[in-house]
Image: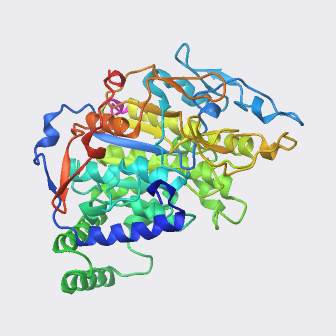
Amino acid sequence: MRTTDFTRRQFVQTLGASTLGALAAGYPRAVLGESAPGRLPATADTVIVLWMGGGMAATETFDPKRYTPFEKGLDPNRVLSTFPSIPTAVDGIRFSEGLERTAKVMDRGTLIRSYTAGDLGFILHSRHQFHWHTGYAPPQTVACPHIGSVIARTLGPKDPAVPAFINIGQRLDVGEGEELKAFTSAGFLGSEFGPFNVPFPDAAKDVVTPPGGMSPSRFENRDRFYRKLVEASPVGQLGSTYQKESLLRSLDNAHRLLGSHAAKAFDLSLEKPEVVAKYAPGGWDFSRRLGGDFTRDGNYEKSNIQRFGLGCLLARRLAEVGARYIEVTTEYIPFLNWDTHENGHEKLVQMKRAIDGAISQLVLDLEERGLLDRTLIVLASEFSRDMMQEGKPDRPITNQVPVPDRIESPAHYGMHRHFTDAGCVLLFGGGMRKGHLHGVTADERPCKTLKDRVVIEDLHASIYRAMGIPPRLAYEIEKRPFYVTRDGVGQPIQSLFA
């Protein structure tokens, strides 16, 4: 069986083997030397990734095509966009309706319309998200580090008290949680370079505060006891000597954060209500009042609007105090958010409300504070969507979602299938060009890439280039090099840079 034909269960089983390999791994030495990052002039000091987990339909967001309004009996082959297009601040660049505030700041950014997802066989969200975040197609024989962990390991923290890699908004106990955990980690690089997870940004203060009701002395005793357990564990039980030492250093880093000035950055209640409202419609109090299990109590869609917005506000605060890599997600949960297998149009109305104000306000706030030029914002998704096409036109995949011959209900009005030949990536700051469009896609189905194709190796190389990291930097693990872009082949897209 080809590796591209792996099922979800086989994927998880293989990840378990690679995790064991990571635990046994020794010190990952930089092949090009520790001074390698300084060989390229950096245009950015911080990266903020805004992750649209689930497959953001390009033709419904940043690459609108011909608009077809809903009507009963509609031929699905006619539907390319279910929203009309709107102008942006840049002549010749149009967005989809519902993104009016982001459209107003397009003159600060670069839009890629030709991102092409990898050919991984049967399309699984977790596999494509693994590919995007690590640069490698699963399964691998080693535990691949997340791009945030690579940046944290290579450049180190900007401030010793601030975690270099902070992950906001993704719970790891929902659908495909095991697969998400596989790449939301530092892999063989060690625990100290893994993500500092903040699943709920409105409760971010709690993650830098000892548990309620626990006295300081009890907290210190628990910390000391855990350290003793780690130190006393035999080699192999918790991994190699390096992995044990890395785990202990991660505890030191967490302890340092608890008592630092930077801990206040996690407290969103310190922001003025009018500022919070610009990021999250309804504001801080509305988000906290909802409460409950958002996936079951009917409040999920409303709360998600707040959570992503508050996540962007938290990202701005963390960038101000020195975080190196921050990721904010709309959260990937099967059949929710951007995973628009049904009720696509209705769900996208909600998702645009969730992201539009937050994106634009993040750009404006960083610009006002003089941080945008050195902060690279990357908005991306694992792939796009199309009503009819699954995969690529020249590499069709078995259809996973049925589309009726005629659209009789709004449930089938929207983007359903996984389209991997063209998707959008939006970039702001960090040395990127302003008001720039990269890539051309077809105006009729299949809306494939026609010009200036972008693949993950080159997109990653461009992000690393902005941070001053050579795309051929490698870490030696198990006596072989592991390159930060696949096999070191990634090339920065020079036309994206100012």
> Which quadrant of the view contains residue 210?
bottom left
> Which quadrant of the view contains residue 93?
top right
Residue 235: image location, x then y, percent: 19, 81
Q: Nearer the viewer, residue 494 or 427?
A: 494
Residue 130: image location, x then y, percent: 43, 53
The residue at the point 32 percent across, 84 percent down is 218
Looking at the image, the residue that sits furthest to the front is 1
Q: Nearer the viewer, residue 345 or 48?
A: 345
Image mark count: 0
Residue 138: image location, x then y, percent: 41, 56
Residue 463: image location, x then y, percent: 32, 37
Left or right of 86 in this view: 136: left
Left or right of 108 in this view: 375: left
* Residue numbers of the magenta segment: 369-373
Task: Answer yes or no: is residue 169 visible.
Answer: no
Task: Answer yes or no: is residue 349 visible.
Answer: yes
The residue at the point 42 percent across, 38 percent down is 378
**The stretch drawn in magenta includes residue 467:** no
The residue at the point 51 percent across, 62 percent down is 171
Q: In this rendering, is residue 9 above or below 222? A: above
The residue at the point 47 percent across, 67 percent down is 12
Specify the principal SS of the magenta part: loop
Q: In this rendering, is residue 79 above or below 476? A: above
Q: Quadrant of the C terminus?
A: top left
